[in-house]
């Protein structure tokens, strides 16, 4: 376990959740009196502080809770414009899908995003990502889907790819987010544009392909064609499934070998069974559910059937304008009935699986050197459960990304 040249060693945390049940206590693999060492961007020591090796820098962090860097595995953070007027319309009872069908909703963000300069888009994304990093989030998945045409979808993917960003960004091509206004009379022409022109180029820039399969968006058959085309080019498959209407997209995702199907408010028993059998991760997006004033997906039934659940913000300007992953974790317990441990696994290890990146979201020697040290809410004990109990706004005391300290809010631990 010991590496000769540990560059950074962290000791003194009140508890460390490795997210590896084989390493410690309970489903989150908790260890007390732990130390984590980093060398060359990776974890090089994980074990008792008493037997930890010498290190170039040794940080003692009493009063903190150690976790692998959190993962927000479903966001739409790259956008311009705002949707406050739509919020009022929806509060007055207008449905999300009819706003979209009348050219608002996602399509209004498309107009604003196309019109924004590269600098504006990059500046706004950078600010959003920095706020997420301060909460301990070291990996953020960001979808396209607010550009839709060839030029702007590829521009967004290049931007996501090139950065530089404060943390690891996983770009997903979501050209199939809505039918753009200019293709309203001929949706097949838009599907052809994606299949023949955009996807072949997007496959070089993105890690995953996603489709919004729903009323007012894409049909099950269109979803199949886009996912097959992307996945045959090596992209990880993801899908927005069973949110507004039941479409059968969760079972389709499972049959195609997609890494995740997200939302799932309307999933049925067959969809659950198919996901469990295929190992498809279920993405829980409780802030979207809350803003849509929807009912909960059958999370307990899914877990009992053997589906592993990720929890994400779905951060976007319309259906989920809340970039706080800790809030999503708390709401997944309150609204969907997850346990504290299930919520913690949902924002770490299971989120890595939802991205098709199984090495992310847990701590192991040789694994990625991403760690966050969280302080508990004022007056609460330094236990991860207090972070889930208290809703949102949590700040990391220290964040390590690929073995380097990228956030440090210390003046005497
Ligand atoms: O995941 N449901 C579709 N897409 C997003 C919403 C995007 C938007 O409203 O701008 C979601 O909730
Ligand atoms: Fe989404």
Image (cartoon, rainbow, N blue to C red):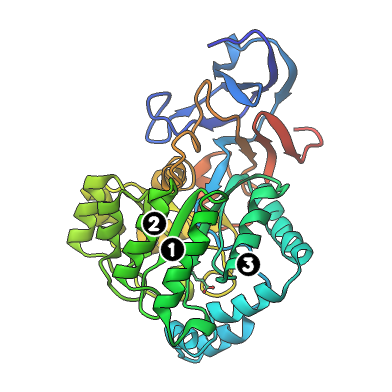
Q: Residue at x 64, y 49 (%)?
A: 161
Q: Residue at x 70, y 40 (%)?
A: 397
What's the distance in space between the residues labelled 3 and 1, CA to CA? 15 Å
Q: Which residue corresponds to mark 3? A: 151
What's the distance in space between the residues labelled 2 and 3, CA to CA? 19 Å
Query: Is residue 339 visible in the rendered structure shown here?
Result: no
Q: Is residue 107 above or below residue 164?
A: below
Residue 160 image offset from top left, x and y in percent: 64, 53
Residue 70 image offset from top left, x and y in percent: 55, 44
Left/right placement of residue 90 relative to residue 129 reads: left
Q: Which residue corresponds to mark 1? A: 195
- Viewer-proximal residue, 111 or 86? 111
Query: Is residue 366 visible in the rendered structure shown here?
Result: yes
Determine whether the residue tagged by mark 1 lies in a helix, strand or loop.
helix
Residue 367 image offset from top left, x and y in percent: 53, 26
Determine whether the residue tagged by mark 3 lies in a helix, strand or loop.
helix
Q: Is residue 249 above or below residue 133?
A: below
Quadrant hosting residue 402: top right
Determine whether the residue tagged by mark 2 lies in a helix, strand or loop.
helix
Disc nearer the start of the sequence (2/3) = 3
Q: Residue at x 54, y 55 (%)?
A: 201
Task: Kindly identify which numbered label has been placed on residue 229.
Answer: 2
Estimate how packed mark 3 is, as few (under 14), some (14 to 19) or many (20 or more) residues with alpha carbons within 10 Å. few
Residue 279 image offset from top left, x and y in percent: 29, 44
Tally of numbered discs: 3
Quadrant in which the C terminus appears: top right
Q: Do callouts 2 and 1 mark residues in contact (Cβ within 8 Å)?
A: yes
Disc nearer the start of the sequence (2/1) = 1
- Viewer-proximal residue, 158 or 55? 158
In the image, farthest residue toward the right: 411
């Amino acid at each position: 376990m010991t590496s000769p040249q540990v560059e950074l060693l962290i000791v003194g945390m009140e508890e460390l959740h490795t997210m590896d049940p084989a390493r410690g206590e309970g489903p989150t693999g908790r260890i007390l009196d732990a130390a984590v060492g980093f060398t060359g961007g990776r974890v090089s020591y994980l074990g008792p502080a008493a037997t930890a090796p010498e290190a170039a820098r040794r940080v003692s962090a009493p009063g903190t809770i150690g976790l692998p860097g959190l993962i927000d595995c479903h966001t739409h953070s790259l956008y311009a414009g705002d949707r406050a007027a739509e919020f009022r319309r929806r509060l007055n009872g207008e449905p999300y899908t009819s706003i979209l069908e009348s050219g608002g909703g996602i399509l209004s963000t498309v107009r604003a995003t196309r019109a924004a300069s590269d600098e504006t888009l990059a500046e706004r994304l950078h600010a959003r990502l920095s706020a997420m990093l301060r909460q301990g989030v070291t990996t953020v998945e960001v979808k396209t889907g607010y550009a839709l045409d060839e030029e702007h979808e590829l521009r967004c993917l290049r931007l996501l790819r090139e950065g530089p960003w404060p943390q690891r960004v996983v770009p997903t091509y979501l050209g199939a987010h809505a039918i753009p206004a200019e293709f309203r009379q001929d949706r097949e022409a838009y599907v052809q544009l994606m299949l023949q022109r955009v996807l072949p180029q997007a496959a070089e820039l993105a890690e995953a392909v996603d489709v919004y399969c729903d009323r007012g968006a894409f049909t099950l058959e269109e979803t199949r064609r886009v996912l097959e085309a992307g996945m045959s080019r090596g992209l990880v498959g993801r899908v927005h499934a069973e949110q507004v209407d039941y479409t059968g997209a969760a079972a389709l995702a499972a049959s195609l070998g997609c890494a995740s199907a997200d939302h799932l408010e309307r999933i049925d028993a067959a969809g659950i069974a198919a996901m469990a059998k295929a190992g498809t991760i279920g993405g829980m997006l409780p802030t979207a559910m809350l803003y849509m004033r929807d009912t909960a997906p059958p999370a307990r039934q899914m877990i009992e059937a053997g589906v592993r659940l990720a929890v994400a913000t779905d951060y976007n300007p319309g259906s989920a304008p809340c970039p706080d992953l800790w809030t999503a974790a708390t709401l997944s317990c309150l609204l969907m009935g997850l346990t504290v441990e299930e919520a913690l696994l949902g924002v770490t290890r299971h989120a890595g699986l939802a991205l098709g990146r199984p090495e992310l979201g847990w701590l192991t020697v040789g694994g990625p050197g991403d760690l966050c040290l969280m302080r508990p809410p004022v007056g609460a004990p330094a236990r991860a459960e207090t972070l889930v109990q208290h809703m949102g706004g949590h700040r990391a005391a220290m964040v390590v990304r690929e073995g380097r300290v990228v956030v440090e809010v210390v003046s005497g631990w």
